[in-house]
Image: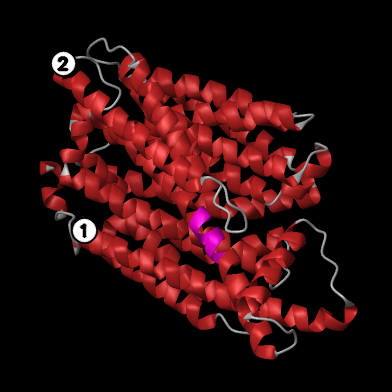
């Protein structure tokens, strides 16, 4: 690897792999974590939520540290923190240690490493090599997220969930060994960390992400209040940073970066596309496990067509540049993902099997790969050299927020869809007396009890209830897919504002 020009790419892809596989690998291991750590499902879900919150809060600051310490030092320190965290999680005797190791230390480490991976690829490669490198980088991250359930399911079923964290530590050891290949990009001038700006953006992103993660249509969490508070804090941050720059003081983030049409539009296209990816990665496992009764490993294999095509076309997408501009490649990718979702919509009917998803997921993965072979490179080309750290932090923060937002929205749609479908079926069946609103309220209480494991269905209603629930799964999945198709249309419309690839560097 030492003599390969792709050494930097291998190291950065390995780092992204362990960060992306982390959550999806553990999502299928919740029951085992609850048993081994003597905790609750809500406790483990809280750990997953906190991990996302910590990354969101520190991502911009983690990126800025490259302008203060240098990129290599930030990456190394982030990797040290992440590795300590993953080893603590692997040996965790209880939930408190898991929270400290996984949610906090890994979250902080990831927020330092992830922006550095973008900066290293931007600085190490140029032209077609850079586009190829970002395609591989994106493909590895996407494939890691998609293969996570298979790996996590295998470890949990046959060995132990702890092996997932040990695997990350072993890969981290390999990254430490390969760091001799990394150039030390040191800051050209001394920059002080804007602590007030770091606090403002951290609190703003924390509140905004928290408002999304606690969305629950069956209760009344203060979503709008937290979201409004987060947006207000971010607005104060924006104004504060603008004033600091006008005074010639060091800033945490150069807000003028959004004057670049390329950077801004590429991020908007990306965040809406991330919404659909998160939605798909959430709905498919839920559907095949609840409706088809698949286990974790079987669920993972359903997603394999998406993972394989995503990886292949992320790496080979640059070959299309001989015939299409980056903008056209992205638009082709969005079109293919849309067609993929359409095929998923077509097969959603009674009697469906896991293999019926293959064509739709393969087309979606192909489109995803094409988009990610171009979008990161295009976004980074819209930033000036001195804005690279800021750009990488913003791009990664946007991706994380998009994934959180997509999961929350789709989760809410699934719950509301099930309520609406079961209510309609009960009302039309005439099995129970009462108005539609009364039936709806009863269904909501039924679902709450089902989530809490307190539901006892009378034997005489068992078959009818199972039939209604299964029908509601089909109806709700269709609704979720239609929602994702609508989001893709927004992403497609935004893509028309992207410049042609050859003009991208002009910003």
- In the rendered image, which quarter is residue 385 located in? top left
> Is label 1 in a helix, a strand or a loop?
helix
First to last magenta residue range: 407-414
Residue at image position (52%, 54%) is 408
Would residue 189 be seen by someone viewing this image from the given angle? Answer: yes
Residue 493 in the image: above or below residue 182: below
Main SS of the magenta part reads helix
Question: Which quadrant: the C terminus?
Answer: top left
Classify 10 Å Cα crowding around label 1: few (below 14), some (14-19), many (20 and above).
Answer: many
- In the rendered image, which quarter is residue 51 located in? top right
Labels in figure, total: 2
Question: Which quadrant: the N terminus?
Answer: top left
Left or right: 327 in relation to 268: left
- In the rendered image, which quarter is residue 430 located in? bottom right
Labelled pair 2, 1 in contact (Cβ < 8 Å): no
Measured as percent of width and height from the top left, residue 314 is found at: 38, 55
Measured as percent of width and height from the top left, residue 2 is found at: 42, 29
Residue occupied by mark 2: 247
Residue at image position (48%, 73%) is 360
Judge whether residue 461 is colored magenta. no
Residue occupied by mark 1: 327
Measured as percent of width and height from the top left, residue 3 is found at: 38, 31
Left or right: 181 in relation to 462: left
Residue 93 in the image: above or below residue 67: below
Judge whether residue 411 is colored magenta. yes
Left or right: 84 in relation to 238: right
> Is label 2 in a helix, a strand or a loop?
loop
Of the pair 245 and 394, the residue shown nearer to us: 245
Extreme-right residue of the structure = 459
Q: How is the image coloured?
A: secondary structure
Q: Earlier in the sequence, mark 2 or mark 1?
A: 2
């Amino acid at each position: 690897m030492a003599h390969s020009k792709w050494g930097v790419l291998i190291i950065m892809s390995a780092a992204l792999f362990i960060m992306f596989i982390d959550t999806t690998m553990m999502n299928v291991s919740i029951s085992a974590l609850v048993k081994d750590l003597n905790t609750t499902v809500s406790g483990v879900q809280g750990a997953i939520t906190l991990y996302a919150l910590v990354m969101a809060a520190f991502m911009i600051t983690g990126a800025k540290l490259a302008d203060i310490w240098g990129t290599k030092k930030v990456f190394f320190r982030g990797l040290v923190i992440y590795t300590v965290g993953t080893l603590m999680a692997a040996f965790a005797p209880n939930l408190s240690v898991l929270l400290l190791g996984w949610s906090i230390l890994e979250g902080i480490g990831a927020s330092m490493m992830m922006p550095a991976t973008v900066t290293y690829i931007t600085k190490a490669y140029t032209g077609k090599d850079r586009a190829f490198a970002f395609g591989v980088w994106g493909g590895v991250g996407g494939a890691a997220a998609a293969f996570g359930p298979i790996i996590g399911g295998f470890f949990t079923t046959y060995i132990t969930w702890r092996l997932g964290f040990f695997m990350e530590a072993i890969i981290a050891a390999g990254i430490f060994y390969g760091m001799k290949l990394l150039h030390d990009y040191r800051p050209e001038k001394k920059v002080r960390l804007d602590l007030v700006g770091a606090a403002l953006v951290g609190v703003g992103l924390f509140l905004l992400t928290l408002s999304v993660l606690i969305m629950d249509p069956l209760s009344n969490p203060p979503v709008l209040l937290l979201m409004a508070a987060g947006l207000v804090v971010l607005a104060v941050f924006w104004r504060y940073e603008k004033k600091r720059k006008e005074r010639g003081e060091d800033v945490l983030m150069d807000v003028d970066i959004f004057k670049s049409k390329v950077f801004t539009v590429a991020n908007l296209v990306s965040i809406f596309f991330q919404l659909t990816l998160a939605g798909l990665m959430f709905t498919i496992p839920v559907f095949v496990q609840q409706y088809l009764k698949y286990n974790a490993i079987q669920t993972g294999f359903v997603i394999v067509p998406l993972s394989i095509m995503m990886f292949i076309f992320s790496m080979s997408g640059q070959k299309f540049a001989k015939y299409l501009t980056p903008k056209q490649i992205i638009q082709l990718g969005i079109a293919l993902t849309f067609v993929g979702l359409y095929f998923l919509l077509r097969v959603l009917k009674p009697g469906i099997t896991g293999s019926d998803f293959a064509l739709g997921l393969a087309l979606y993965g192909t489109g995803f790969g094409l988009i990610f072979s171009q979008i990161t490179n295009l976004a980074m080309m819209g930033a000036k050299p001195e804005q690279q750290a800021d750009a990488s932090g913003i791009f990664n923060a946007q991706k994380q927020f998009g994934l959180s937002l997509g999961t929350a929205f789709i989760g809410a749609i699934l719950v509301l869809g099930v309520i609406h479908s079961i209510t309609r079926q009960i009302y039309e069946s005439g099995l129970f007396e009462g108005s539609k609103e009364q039936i709806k309220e009863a269904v909501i209480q039924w679902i709450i009890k089902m989530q809490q494991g307190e539901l006892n269905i009378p034997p005489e209603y068992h078959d009818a209830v199972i039939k209604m629930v299964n029908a509601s799964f089909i109806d709700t999945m269709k609704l979720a897919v239609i929602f994702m198709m609508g989001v893709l249309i927004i992403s497609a419309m935004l893509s028309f504002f992207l410049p042609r690839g050859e003009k991208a560097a002009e910003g």
